[in-house]
Amino acid sequence: MPLNDSLTRRFRKIVGRPNVDTGTAELLTFASDGLTLHQAAPECVVYPQSTGEVAAIVKACNRAGVPFVARGAGTGLSGGAIIDGGVIIQLSRMNQIIYLSADNRFAIVQPGVVNSYLSLQTRPYGLEFAPDPSSQAACTIGGNVAENAGGPHTLKQGVTLNHVLGQTVVMADGQVATFGGPYLAQTGPSFSSFLVGSEGTLGITTEVTVRLVPVAAGITTMLATFADPAGATDSVTAILAARILPSALEFIDQLCIQAVEAHLKVGFPTDAGAILLIELDTDDERSKGQAETIEALCREHGAIDFTLAQSEEERQKLWLGRKHVAGAMGKISPAYYTNDGVVPRSRLTDILQAVYRIAGIHKLKVANIAHAGDGNIHPLILFDPDTPDGADRALACSEDILAACLEMGGSLSGEHGIGLEKREMMARMYSGADLAHMRRLRNGLSPLGLLNPCKLLPEGARCGEVKNGATLPEGTWL
């Protein structure tokens, strides 16, 4: 049934008429996130600017029995921030840095603050927010928290979870709770940590207290070139086994290199089978010794060239290529589908060989980038959407790659989340008992099942039960 007019009027009273969208054209812009194979349009988008407004919107949705989901920049890649009907609570206008303490190395920010903007504001104090997803120029802190985002430089510093100290959260019933705080020593259960990575299914974060870390005093950036991708992945294992912990250790294969060079011409060798982009966060004598060890290990595993960036400009050029791999795919394919599996780092060579083999089975090309030091692979499955089975083959290829990750003792996601994309595969990763406990936890915090329904856990058959204005039976969980 259409969204109740009285609910729309209530939203306008809460946030003002200009901050409520119900027009068809406006709603279509929210019908997908970065993962365009899943599309579903909301019936209303509301733009709050405070915790109080978010709480009032949530309470209104609960009274009307209308499902709702929080959304940030829409750069997610698992369909987690879309909803079929219902309400999107769009948090992009909650974009203020509320408080910054350089002495205590923390900041309190609203969820709509763009990732890279936060570090831009803290660098004059010699500090930065360590998680740096490739979409950091667009993605927001709230989305980083929801998906537990990582990035190339989290190998040494850790993912978002390791940098969230506390949160203010509007719970599923509209109550406001504060978990954690600005200091490392906390008392009681760590509810804030529990919420990180829950993909907006347990509450809506409206303020985040984040840890800031010192900017590295110096940086050594290296580019290792290999004729064979296996030499690159074997080198990753060897570097980490040598007890060297780079701040970044990134893998890029030939298809990605060719796309980047066609797009940006950053200087990647187009005839290479793969390259490793390696970074140490100091440039002192110790790091020079580590760089020499890294070069020796890479050459031992088949590196045909090994260079050090000679200037900050050269370093930034290399990272420009790495950060824009996905955007460059349009140079070699009309469409692609992004995968986000994880394997133990010692199985990188095995999973890469499996990816190429699976791609052959599905008669598709797959371009590969990876946060190799984390074992987090990002195969980019190239396909033609104009062919009748193009998207279906890409999805089947992705599922087979994820199944291979699980067989190797890995995970379905390193940072993109489960959302809609991988929901039904959760039963392959977790036992029935595991999933039952997850359901009980979510049901306890969201008993009506209205908060971001149909995401994360495999209950797809029951998702159709959530309709605007529906009365759900006691104990229903979605």
Image (cartoon, grey):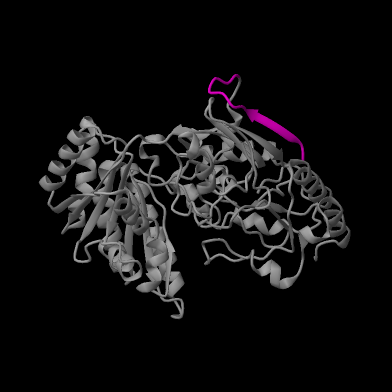
Quadrant location of the N terminus in the rendered image: bottom right
Q: Position of residue 340 (x, y in %)?
A: 42, 53
Which image quadrant for residue 168?
top right
Count of marks placed on residues = 0
Q: Is residue 203 left or right of residue 53?
A: left
Region rendered in magenta: 174-187
Q: Nearer the viewer, residue 118 or 311?
A: 311
Say if residue 173 shows up in the picture.
Answer: no
Q: Is residue 25 left or right of residue 390?
A: right
Q: Position of residue 438 (x, y in %)?
A: 58, 39
Main secondary-structure element of the magenta-colored stretch: loop
Q: Is residue 27 left or right of residue 35?
A: right
Which image quadrant for residue 22?
bottom right
x 61%, y 20%: residue: 188
x 70%, y 47%: residue: 449
Q: Is residue 442 magenta?
A: no
Location of residue 110 with respect to 315 vertically, above or below = above
x 28%, y 63%: residue: 257
Q: Position of residue 316 (x, y in %)?
A: 35, 52
Q: Nearer the viewer, residue 472 or 419?
A: 419
Q: Nearer the viewer, residue 379 or 156?
A: 156
Which image quadrant for residue 9?
bottom right
Say if residue 94 shows up in the picture.
Answer: yes
Q: Nearer the viewer, residue 216 or 82?
A: 216
Q: Is residue 183 left or right of residue 290?
A: right
x 62%, y 53%: residue: 454
Q: Position of residue 190 (x, y in %)?
A: 58, 27
Q: Is residue 180 magenta?
A: yes
Location of residue 217 with respect to 467 vertically, above or below = above
